[in-house]
Image: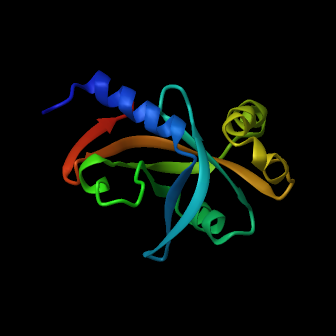
Amino acid sequence: MSQDLPEIRNDLKKLLRTQPLAVLSTQQDGQPYASLVAFACSDDLARLYFATIRSTRKFANIMKDSRVAMLIDSRSNAPADFQQATAVTATGKTAEVAPEERNGILALYLAKHPYLESFAQSPTCALCEVRVRTYFVCTRFQNVVEVHIK
């Protein structure tokens, strides 16, 4: 059964609001690198936010090449996941949040992850945003729908 775009967007928004972690994929010299990150999303789904220490490999990678992918899923690590789980890959470009926007975005991030307050407010921590171009929404293990963000 196919879903219409508003239903897909609603399901996507629910997944992004309820899942705390994502896998961030970066690259360096053509070599992929994956990192687990806590994330938050903007209401319009156009931005995903994560925090990282500036001395990390992931931060160095995004400073060299801003293209990233983030995987967010609803799996429970059970056989039923093959039919019931949803996996979303968000692709786009990332950058450190501008200083004048940091406080508002930090509040959004900490509303979802209050236990990361001391980490996120550390002077060595960068708050980053992914400007999402496309979400690839995979359901039932093989049904993929593209959601393009303008």
Q: Residue at x 78, y 33 (%)?
A: 103
In the rendered image, residue 117, in percent from the top left (x then y), is placed at: 81, 45
Q: Nearer the viewer, residue 83 or 103?
A: 83
Residue 21 appears in the picture as rendered: yes
Q: Nearer the viewer, residue 98 or 56?
A: 56
Q: Residue at x 64, y 71 (%)?
A: 57
Residue 14 location, quadrant: top left
Above or below: residue 56 compared with residue 45: below
In the rendered image, residue 132, in percent from the top left (x then y), is placed at: 45, 42
Residue 47 appears in the picture as rendered: no
In the rendered image, residue 66, in percent from the top left (x then y), is placed at: 53, 57
Q: Residue at x 49, y 26 (%)?
A: 44
**64 on left or right of 125:** left
**Numbered marks: total:** 0
Above or below: residue 96 compared with residue 99: below
In the rendered image, residue 32, in percent from the top left (x then y), is placed at: 45, 73
For the C terminus, give its image quadrant: top left
Farthest top residue in view: 6
Farthest left residue in view: 1
Q: Residue at x 36, y 43 (%)?
A: 135
